[in-house]
Amino acid sequence: MTKNPRWLNAKIPKLLIFTKGMTLIEIMVSLVILMVILGAIFSILNMQQSKSVDVQATSVLQTDAQVALTLFSWDLYMAGYGLANNDTSIISTNNATPTSSDNVRLHGAGLAFESGRANWSPILAAVQQSNQIEVFRFADSSANLNVNDTIIIVDQAKTLIDSNLVITSIDTVLHTAGEDTIPAFTLTLNKTVSVGQGTIVFSPDRNTYFNGVTYTINNKKLMRANDVFLENVEDIQFAYGVDLNDNGVFETSEWFNDLNVIPDFSPQLLYQHKTAIRATFVVLSEKRIPGYQYPADTINIEDHTYALDVIGRGFKREIVTAIVQPRNLRE
């Protein structure tokens, strides 16, 4: 038997083995899966961003409403400050129609915001039934009282002593206190008063103090006199509590939406009984919130009920309420 040829016994080199690549179909499937994953991630991020915007809008809404209500409550608290109890301290207009909000005018409340415009000075010596009082004279002349100023006198506990006093003349003097001399003015008034040393005299800004400061809504802006106090306000409503039976509790029957419907109402009545003011704001988000719907078709506040249209229901709302007892409407 013949031997195999030599070339058959030669070692045959191993063939190179190539890894099989991805087919076009596999690549397309992979891309589809990747797009699904990226789409899911984008949806989650978009949802979180939307929630973040909603939370931010709601947070700003709540903060603005609470700050505004706090400042407004101070005006309510100061209503009637320094006014005699037969003077009008509160005037309100009750609007129960669907398109109208309440408004209120507060007299004597100007010191809450306009204190920088109110000149004041301590009385340096006690007097009895005199039309002249001595007050401290400040080095800054703009801080001193002037002729024709209408002044109010309160004691150190801020209790009214006299009001609607007018300065008819002013003399520059030196007040002697022990071994010291103090720069002073002698104020001549239009009537006699009895006051003690340390009592405070002040002359508030007449426009806001005596004429009253009005809160009202104009084009969804809450106005304090002619200034914008808070934007995006849909409604403001007031109710007035008067403890007519003097049992220390504001019963349901002792809350009124209009001052004029309080039995035997007069300006003095608010001083004769414990009195409170309930104020409620409805504040809107600045913009519509996509996909959001206010959970009710109507809003009911005090005696005011109004319907929300389709567009209006897309705004978030914060309803804030405060009950304030003016410090001065008491005997």
Image: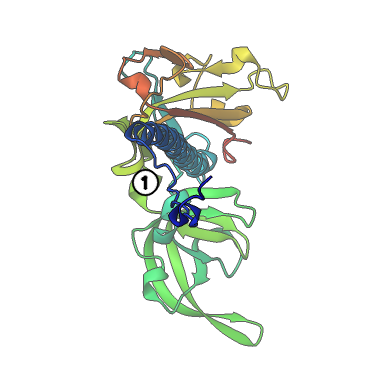
| Residue placed most toward the observer, 107 or 116 | 116
Q: Position of residue 240 (x, y in %)?
A: 53, 23
Q: Residues within 10 Å of mark 1 (few under 14, many from 20)?
A: many
| Residue placed most toward the observer, 323 or 255 | 323
Residue 305 in the image: above or below residue 153: above
Q: Which residue is mark 1?
A: 208
Residue 53: name its quadrant: top left
| Residue placed most toward the observer, 52 or 109 | 52
Q: Position of residue 75 (x, y in %)?
A: 48, 42
Residue 260 in the image: above or below residue 198: above
The residue under label 1 is which amino acid type? Thr
Q: Residue extending furthest front? A: 1
66 relative position to 222: left or right: right
Q: Position of residue 88 (x, y in %)?
A: 44, 33
**Which residue: 28% across, 43% down?**
226
Q: Position of residue 274 (x, y in %)?
A: 63, 29
| Residue placed most toward the observer, 189 or 197 | 197
Residue 95: name its quadrant: top left
Q: Residue extending furthest left? A: 219
